[in-house]
Image (cartoon, rainbow, N blue to C red):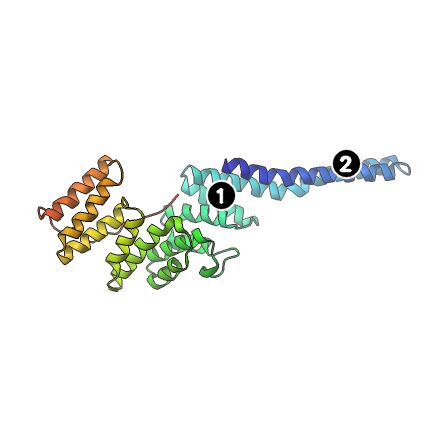
């Protein structure tokens, strides 16, 4: 549906341009025909040809954008990046939708700095003016770049409620590295929004076990298990965490999860 809407939005202006050229060609032909049939014919066909000539740059950009969005939706990240880049080089508008698709493609390639640049380009020179869903992505990119203070600022100005669990998780990661003492609270806030979010469960359980609070760690793991049907991978993860809670395995080590979206 998204691609269909995109194609229509690009096709309608082109058809309108062709129609205007045809109407203008017929009008001028009729005005000039009484004086010179040759000139009238030349004017008519000249205006008819003008439509396609004017449409070529727009049609080229449209083709690149449609191809880029198709690649993005199918997870072909390198192809999406290449076509988004060509679209921008040819003067395509970096709307929030384009920034989102291109930024996600770059993030899936672990090109954090490049993704940050795309997300902050166009009409959004300051993180405070970003579209809600873009601010979270900027914060994630800056976190993986190691720009912790800038990442926290981007995450805190976000207004996207659908990504609140991710925002809290990354604020927890930043807080843990800055020794703010708020990391566990941030991880648990993330889990209150999405209890089966494994990275937050892992980090919260790890920190509770480091503090010696096995009951709190066990409670988090119980909620993780109850929230959805467990996949084989989730079952393996839960067993390993349970072994650590029970003291049969060491406390889980510090671990960085690379989290991207689609």
Q: What residue is drawn where x is 49% and y is 47%?
A: 97
Mark 1 nearby-residue class (10 Å; few <14, some 14–19, many ≥20): many
Classify mark 2: helix, strand or loop.
helix
Q: What residue is drawn where x is 49% and y is 50%?
A: 96
Mark 1 / mark 2, whichever is N-terminal: 2
Q: Could you tell me if residue 46 is visible in this image?
A: no
CA gap, disc 1 and disc 2:
34 Å
Residue 44 as seen in the image, left or right of residue 132: right
Q: Quadrant of residue 173?
A: bottom left
> In the rendered image, which residue does mark 2 sit on?
45
Q: Quadrant of residue 27?
A: top right
Q: The C terminus appears in which quarter of the rendering?
A: top left
Q: What residue is drawn where x is 49% and y is 60%?
A: 125
Q: What residue is drawn where x is 42% and y is 36%?
A: 74
State whether residue 214 is above or below residue 79: below
The one nearer the camera, 235 or 123, is 235
Classify mark 1: helix, strand or loop.
helix
The one nearer the camera, 229 or 120, is 229
Q: Could you tell me if residue 143 is visible in this image?
A: yes
The one nearer the camera, 133 or 190, is 190
Residue 16 as seen in the image, left or right of residue 207: right
Q: Are marks 1 and 2 in contact (CB under 8 Å)?
A: no
Residue 150 as seen in the image, left or right of residue 39: left
> In the rendered image, which residue does mark 1 sit on?
83
Mark 2 nearby-residue class (10 Å; few <14, some 14–19, many ≥20): some
Residue 198 lies, in percent from the top left, at 26, 46
Residue 260 lies, in percent from the top left, at 35, 47
């Amino acid at each position: 549906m998204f691609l269909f809407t995109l194609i229509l939005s690009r096709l309608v202006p082109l058809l309108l341009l062709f129609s205007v050229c045809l109407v203008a060609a017929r009008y001028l032909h009729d005005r000039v025909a009484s004086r010179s049939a040759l000139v009238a014919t030349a004017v008519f066909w000249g205006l008819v040809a003008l439509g396609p000539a004017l449409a070529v740059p727009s049609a080229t950009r449209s083709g690149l954008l449609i191809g880029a969005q198709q690649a993005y939706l199918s997870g072909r990240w390198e192809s999406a990046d290449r076509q988004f880049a060509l679209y921008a080089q040819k003067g395509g508008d970096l709307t929030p939708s384009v920034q989102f698709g291109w930024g996600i493609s770059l993030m899936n390639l672990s090109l954090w700095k490049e993704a940050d640049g795309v997300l902050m380009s166009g009409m959004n020179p300051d993180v405070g003016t970003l579209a809600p869903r873009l601010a979270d992505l900027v914060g994630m990119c800056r976190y993986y770049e190691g720009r912790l203070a800038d990442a926290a600022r981007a995450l805190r100005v976000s207004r996207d409620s659908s990504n609140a669990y991710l925002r809290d998780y990354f604020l927890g990661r930043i807080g843990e590295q800055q020794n703010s003492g708020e990391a566990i609270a941030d991880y648990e806030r993330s889990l209150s929004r999405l209890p089966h979010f494994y990275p937050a469960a892992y980090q919260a359980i790890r920190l509770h076990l480091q503090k010696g609070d096995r009951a709190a760690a066990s409670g988090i793991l119980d909620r993780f298990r109850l929230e959805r049907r467990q996949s084989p991978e989730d079952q393996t993860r839960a067993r390993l965490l349970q072994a650590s809670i029970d003291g049969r395995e060491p406390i889980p080590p510090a671990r960085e999860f690379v989290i991207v979206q689609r």
